[in-house]
Image (spheres, helix red, strand yellow):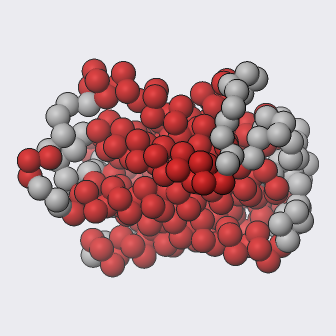
Amino acid sequence: MSDPAAPATAPGRLLAAGLLILMGMMWGLQFAMLKLTSSGGYSEIAVVMIALVLLSVAFLAISHVRGEHIRSLRGILRFLLVTSVLGYVIPLLAALTAAAELSTGLLSLTGSTSPVVAVTIALALRTERVSPRRLSAVALGLLSVGMILVPQVEAPGFGMAPWILLALLVPLSYGIESIYIARHWPEGMTALQAVTGETVAAAILMVPLFALFGGTLPLSSGWTLAETAILIFVAAGVVESLIYFYLIKHTGGVFVNFGTFVSLFAGIGWGIVLFGESHSAVVWGAALLLMGSLYLVSRGP
């Protein structure tokens, strides 16, 4: 089991940094794809169900080729259930629901606060050393969220505040999950086994929700941009999930969240290119504050 505060030495710093950049790019792309799927006539639960089934098939196929099957659930079932809920069910449903109301850039900004959550939890659990730098990082991260949230609370009808709060479930879930994985990684489990088990568990958990609330699938409308977005989301998900678990196992539960450096501006960039989004000075100011927070939290081990 890796120490959440461990330095990125196992895979080498250059390799770890390169993987982190690629993972962040995939995260940013996924936020943009969620925006596209929200306009395709699918319910949020239907999109999550379809994505999880496709992801499960992909990971099971990769596991079969590599011969890395999970041969027994003894001692790992709770781990898989917790990570499936924190890593897929809660953040995907929250992001998809909020994506219909928020811009891709704003969705990316809120999602990019996961390192602040991870460090806050690590400080509370005493797995991170309390220091002025860490406390300043948390303060800047909270201030960046406040900059975009407070004006919405003061707007008539609370503006977009409810949707921003919903979107904040994404970093909250990811931040908790990364620390949980680093502390409770089952002995002998590979990264591929972990991500395959988590994804299949999430798909199974979604079946009753889909049966009760999923509604119908708009298959009669033919192939649209929404279906293409779902496939791109799945492909990006395969790449980022494998990197995510690999980095958590070898570098700890805090380091992996720094891929949000890339995903923050990747998400904003995709929003500008695909949807012609523009952002106010307040949003750009919040993004800069968050970058300062991420910089402080990523310095040192």
| Residue 213 visible in the snapshot | yes
Q: Furthest-left residue in view?
A: 220
Q: Residue at x 53, y 57 (%)?
A: 238
Return the x and y of residue 146 as percentages of the image width and height.
53, 52
Q: Quadrant of residue 47?
A: top left
Position of residue 45 relative to residue 34, above or below, is above
The quarter of the image holding the C terminus is bottom right
Q: Quadrant of residue 24?
A: bottom right
The quarter of the image holding the N terminus is top right
Q: Residue at x 24, y 57 (%)?
A: 226
In the figure, is residue 131 to the left or right of 205? right
Return the x and y of residue 112 as percentages of the image width and height.
56, 58
Position of residue 15 relative to residue 23, above or below, is below
In the figure, is residue 295 to the left or right of 40? right
Return the x and y of residue 193 as percentages of the image width and height.
67, 43
Return the x and y of residue 14 as percentages of the image width and height.
79, 77
Q: Residue at x 53, y 31 (%)?
A: 201
Position of residue 158 relative to residue 210, above or below, is below
Residue toward you, 128 or 148: 128
Q: Residue at x 75, y 46 (%)?
A: 190
In the figure, is residue 98 to the left or right of 253? left
Q: How many marks?
A: 0
| Residue 31 visible in the snapshot | no
Residue toward you, 166 or 37: 37
Residue toward you, 189 or 112: 189
